Image: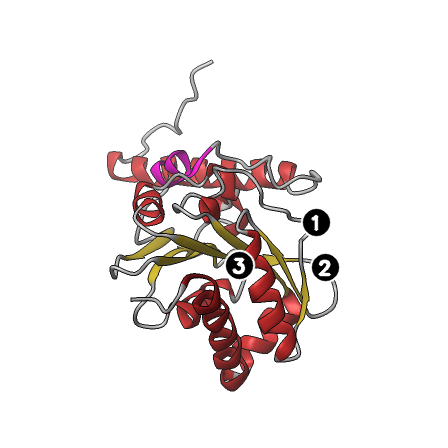
Amino acid sequence: MRKCLPQGTPPRQLPQLKRAFFVWAAVAAWTAVAAWPSSADDFYPDAVSMEAAWSEGRDYRVEALARGSPVAVFAIHGGIEPGTARVARALAGADWNLFVFQALGKDIPSEALHVTSRHFNDPRALQLARSSLLGISIHGEKDSGSIACIGGLNAPLRQAVAQSLRAIGIDAQEPCSRFPALALDNIANVPRDHGIQIEMTKSLRNGLVRDQDRLARFAEAVREAVSRVAGPPR
Protein backbone atom coordinates (compact mmCIF):
# COMPACT_ATOMS: atom_id res chain seq x y z
CA MET A 1 0.00 0.00 0.00
CA ARG A 2 1.34 3.42 -0.89
CA LYS A 3 2.15 5.55 2.14
CA CYS A 4 0.28 8.87 1.99
CA LEU A 5 1.58 12.09 3.43
CA PRO A 6 -0.70 14.36 5.44
CA GLN A 7 -2.73 16.63 3.18
CA GLY A 8 -1.02 19.93 2.52
CA THR A 9 2.52 18.74 3.37
CA PRO A 10 4.86 21.43 1.96
CA PRO A 11 7.21 20.02 -0.74
CA ARG A 12 10.24 21.44 1.10
CA GLN A 13 9.46 19.14 4.03
CA LEU A 14 9.58 15.95 1.96
CA PRO A 15 13.39 15.40 2.29
CA GLN A 16 13.16 15.84 6.06
CA LEU A 17 10.25 13.41 6.29
CA LYS A 18 12.07 10.88 4.12
CA ARG A 19 15.19 11.13 6.27
CA ALA A 20 13.14 10.85 9.44
CA PHE A 21 11.57 7.65 8.11
CA PHE A 22 14.95 6.10 7.37
CA VAL A 23 16.28 7.13 10.77
CA TRP A 24 13.27 5.48 12.38
CA ALA A 25 13.81 2.36 10.26
CA ALA A 26 17.49 2.15 11.22
CA VAL A 27 16.71 2.56 14.90
CA ALA A 28 13.98 -0.08 14.76
CA ALA A 29 16.21 -2.49 12.85
CA TRP A 30 19.13 -2.01 15.22
CA THR A 31 16.88 -2.53 18.21
CA ALA A 32 15.99 -5.87 16.68
CA VAL A 33 19.54 -6.99 15.86
CA ALA A 34 21.25 -5.64 18.97
CA ALA A 35 20.13 -8.63 20.99
CA TRP A 36 21.51 -11.14 18.49
CA PRO A 37 24.57 -13.05 19.70
CA SER A 38 26.81 -12.48 16.68
CA SER A 39 28.14 -9.17 15.39
CA ALA A 40 28.12 -10.79 11.93
CA ASP A 41 24.43 -9.90 11.72
CA ASP A 42 24.91 -6.21 10.94
CA PHE A 43 22.11 -4.06 9.62
CA TYR A 44 24.00 -3.52 6.33
CA PRO A 45 25.72 -6.31 4.37
CA ASP A 46 28.92 -4.33 3.82
CA ALA A 47 30.54 -0.92 4.27
CA VAL A 48 29.70 0.28 0.78
CA SER A 49 25.98 -0.30 1.38
CA MET A 50 26.13 1.30 4.81
CA GLU A 51 27.96 4.40 3.61
CA ALA A 52 25.59 4.81 0.66
CA ALA A 53 22.60 4.83 3.03
CA TRP A 54 23.91 7.74 5.09
CA SER A 55 25.68 11.02 4.53
CA GLU A 56 29.45 11.36 4.86
CA GLY A 57 30.28 14.43 6.90
CA ARG A 58 26.96 14.40 8.69
CA ASP A 59 26.42 10.80 9.86
CA TYR A 60 29.99 9.56 9.60
CA ARG A 61 33.48 10.75 8.76
CA VAL A 62 36.30 8.91 6.99
CA GLU A 63 40.00 9.62 7.48
CA ALA A 64 42.28 7.86 4.98
CA LEU A 65 45.96 8.80 5.10
CA ALA A 66 48.33 7.08 2.67
CA ARG A 67 51.83 7.94 3.89
CA GLY A 68 53.86 5.46 1.88
CA SER A 69 54.44 3.26 4.91
CA PRO A 70 54.48 -0.56 4.85
CA VAL A 71 52.18 -0.53 7.90
CA ALA A 72 48.48 0.42 7.87
CA VAL A 73 46.46 1.04 11.04
CA PHE A 74 42.68 0.70 10.95
CA ALA A 75 39.89 1.81 13.28
CA ILE A 76 36.71 0.90 11.43
CA HIS A 77 34.41 1.31 14.44
CA GLY A 78 35.34 4.77 15.64
CA GLY A 79 32.48 6.31 17.60
CA ILE A 80 30.92 2.86 17.90
CA GLU A 81 33.65 1.32 20.04
CA PRO A 82 34.81 4.39 22.00
CA GLY A 83 38.52 5.04 22.19
CA THR A 84 39.52 2.92 19.21
CA ALA A 85 40.02 5.85 16.85
CA ARG A 86 42.13 7.67 19.43
CA VAL A 87 44.31 4.61 19.97
CA ALA A 88 44.69 4.05 16.22
CA ARG A 89 45.80 7.63 15.63
CA ALA A 90 48.35 7.43 18.43
CA LEU A 91 49.68 4.16 17.03
CA ALA A 92 49.93 5.43 13.45
CA GLY A 93 51.71 8.58 14.57
CA ALA A 94 52.81 10.82 11.72
CA ASP A 95 54.35 8.13 9.51
CA TRP A 96 52.18 4.98 9.34
CA ASN A 97 49.20 4.71 7.01
CA LEU A 98 45.89 5.33 8.79
CA PHE A 99 42.22 4.64 8.12
CA VAL A 100 39.50 5.71 10.54
CA PHE A 101 35.76 5.34 10.11
CA GLN A 102 34.09 7.59 12.68
CA ALA A 103 30.36 7.37 13.39
CA LEU A 104 29.17 10.85 14.34
CA GLY A 105 25.97 9.68 16.05
CA LYS A 106 23.95 12.85 15.48
CA ASP A 107 20.70 11.35 14.22
CA ILE A 108 21.08 7.59 14.48
CA PRO A 109 22.49 5.12 17.01
CA SER A 110 26.14 4.72 16.10
CA GLU A 111 25.83 0.93 16.38
CA ALA A 112 23.62 0.97 13.28
CA LEU A 113 26.76 1.92 11.30
CA HIS A 114 28.69 -1.11 12.57
CA VAL A 115 30.03 -3.37 9.81
CA THR A 116 32.15 -6.38 10.72
CA SER A 117 35.79 -6.55 9.66
CA ARG A 118 35.16 -9.21 7.01
CA HIS A 119 32.55 -7.02 5.31
CA PHE A 120 34.32 -3.69 5.63
CA ASN A 121 34.92 -3.04 1.92
CA ASP A 122 35.22 0.74 1.86
CA PRO A 123 37.35 1.31 -1.29
CA ARG A 124 39.67 3.73 0.54
CA ALA A 125 40.34 1.20 3.29
CA LEU A 126 40.95 -1.60 0.78
CA GLN A 127 43.30 0.52 -1.31
CA LEU A 128 45.31 1.43 1.79
CA ALA A 129 45.41 -2.20 2.92
CA ARG A 130 46.47 -3.55 -0.48
CA SER A 131 49.29 -1.03 -0.72
CA SER A 132 50.67 -2.01 2.71
CA LEU A 133 52.77 -4.90 3.96
CA LEU A 134 51.19 -5.25 7.42
CA GLY A 135 47.82 -4.33 8.91
CA ILE A 136 46.89 -3.51 12.50
CA SER A 137 43.19 -3.16 13.27
CA ILE A 138 42.04 -1.70 16.59
CA HIS A 139 38.71 -2.84 18.06
CA GLY A 140 36.75 -2.66 21.28
CA GLU A 141 35.14 -5.54 23.13
CA LYS A 142 32.77 -5.75 26.10
CA ASP A 143 34.54 -8.27 28.32
CA SER A 144 35.56 -7.27 31.84
CA GLY A 145 39.11 -6.62 32.94
CA SER A 146 41.86 -4.65 31.23
CA ILE A 147 42.84 -6.93 28.38
CA ALA A 148 44.20 -6.80 24.83
CA CYS A 149 43.19 -9.90 22.87
CA ILE A 150 45.36 -10.29 19.78
CA GLY A 151 44.18 -12.17 16.70
CA GLY A 152 45.06 -12.06 13.01
CA LEU A 153 46.83 -14.19 10.43
CA ASN A 154 50.37 -12.91 11.06
CA ALA A 155 51.41 -15.19 13.93
CA PRO A 156 54.94 -13.77 14.42
CA LEU A 157 53.51 -10.27 14.70
CA ARG A 158 50.77 -11.45 17.10
CA GLN A 159 53.37 -13.01 19.35
CA ALA A 160 55.76 -10.05 19.20
CA VAL A 161 53.03 -7.52 20.03
CA ALA A 162 51.76 -9.67 22.91
CA GLN A 163 55.28 -9.90 24.31
CA SER A 164 55.83 -6.13 24.05
CA LEU A 165 52.50 -5.30 25.69
CA ARG A 166 53.13 -7.69 28.56
CA ALA A 167 56.48 -6.00 29.11
CA ILE A 168 54.68 -2.71 29.88
CA GLY A 169 52.13 -4.37 32.18
CA ILE A 170 49.22 -4.93 29.79
CA ASP A 171 47.44 -8.29 29.94
CA ALA A 172 47.81 -9.50 26.34
CA GLN A 173 46.04 -12.71 25.31
CA GLU A 174 47.46 -14.41 22.23
CA PRO A 175 46.10 -16.12 20.26
CA CYS A 176 42.68 -14.57 20.78
CA SER A 177 40.20 -17.42 21.07
CA ARG A 178 37.19 -15.10 21.32
CA PHE A 179 38.11 -13.05 18.24
CA PRO A 180 40.65 -15.06 16.21
CA ALA A 181 40.39 -12.79 13.12
CA LEU A 182 41.75 -15.46 10.77
CA ALA A 183 39.63 -14.72 7.69
CA LEU A 184 41.55 -13.56 4.63
CA ASP A 185 38.96 -10.86 3.94
CA ASN A 186 39.28 -9.33 7.40
CA ILE A 187 40.59 -5.81 6.71
CA ALA A 188 43.56 -6.49 9.04
CA ASN A 189 44.63 -9.43 6.86
CA VAL A 190 44.29 -7.80 3.43
CA PRO A 191 47.87 -6.40 3.39
CA ARG A 192 50.50 -8.55 1.66
CA ASP A 193 51.87 -10.14 4.84
CA HIS A 194 48.47 -9.98 6.56
CA GLY A 195 48.31 -8.50 10.05
CA ILE A 196 46.77 -8.48 13.50
CA GLN A 197 43.53 -7.44 15.15
CA ILE A 198 43.74 -6.03 18.68
CA GLU A 199 40.49 -6.34 20.64
CA MET A 200 40.63 -4.08 23.68
CA THR A 201 38.28 -4.13 26.65
CA LYS A 202 36.50 -0.94 27.69
CA SER A 203 38.65 -0.64 30.81
CA LEU A 204 41.86 -0.78 28.80
CA ARG A 205 40.62 1.70 26.19
CA ASN A 206 39.46 4.13 28.85
CA GLY A 207 42.74 3.86 30.69
CA LEU A 208 44.76 4.61 27.56
CA VAL A 209 42.60 7.54 26.49
CA ARG A 210 42.73 9.13 29.95
CA ASP A 211 46.47 8.66 30.41
CA GLN A 212 48.51 10.11 27.54
CA ASP A 213 51.76 8.66 28.90
CA ARG A 214 50.28 5.18 29.01
CA LEU A 215 48.87 5.60 25.50
CA ALA A 216 52.30 6.64 24.28
CA ARG A 217 53.87 3.58 25.92
CA PHE A 218 51.25 1.34 24.30
CA ALA A 219 51.97 2.80 20.86
CA GLU A 220 55.73 2.54 21.39
CA ALA A 221 55.43 -1.10 22.47
CA VAL A 222 53.41 -2.09 19.40
CA ARG A 223 55.68 -0.17 17.06
CA GLU A 224 58.76 -1.80 18.61
CA ALA A 225 57.21 -5.22 18.04
CA VAL A 226 56.54 -4.37 14.38
CA SER A 227 60.16 -3.30 13.98
CA ARG A 228 61.36 -6.62 15.38
CA VAL A 229 59.19 -8.58 12.95
CA ALA A 230 59.37 -6.49 9.80
CA GLY A 231 62.26 -4.05 10.30
CA PRO A 232 61.96 -0.29 10.93
CA PRO A 233 59.07 1.33 9.02
CA ARG A 234 60.21 3.56 6.17
Q: Residue furthest top?
A: 1
Task: Kindly indicate the quadrant of the structure image that contains residue 166.
Answer: bottom right
Q: Residue at x 31, y 35 (%)?
A: 14
Q: Residue at x 45, y 45 (%)?
A: 187
Numbered disc 2: secondary structure: loop
Could you tell me residue 130's position as x and y percent?
33, 44
Q: Main secondary structure of the magenta part?
A: helix
For badge 2, the amino acid type reads Asp
Instruction: Quickly name the residue at label 1.
Output: 178
Q: Is residue 233 left or right of residue 103?
A: left
Instruction: Quickly name the residue at label 2.
Output: 143
Q: Does any portion of residue 8 appear in the rendered image?
A: yes
Task: Kindly indicate the quadrant of the structure image that contains residue 141.
Answer: bottom right
Q: Is residue 58 left or right of residue 82?
A: left
Q: Are there few (<14), some (14-19), or many (20+) residues within 10 Å of tag 3?
A: many
What label sits on residue 187 in the rendered view?
Answer: none
In the rendered structure, which segment of residues is drawn in magenta?
46-52
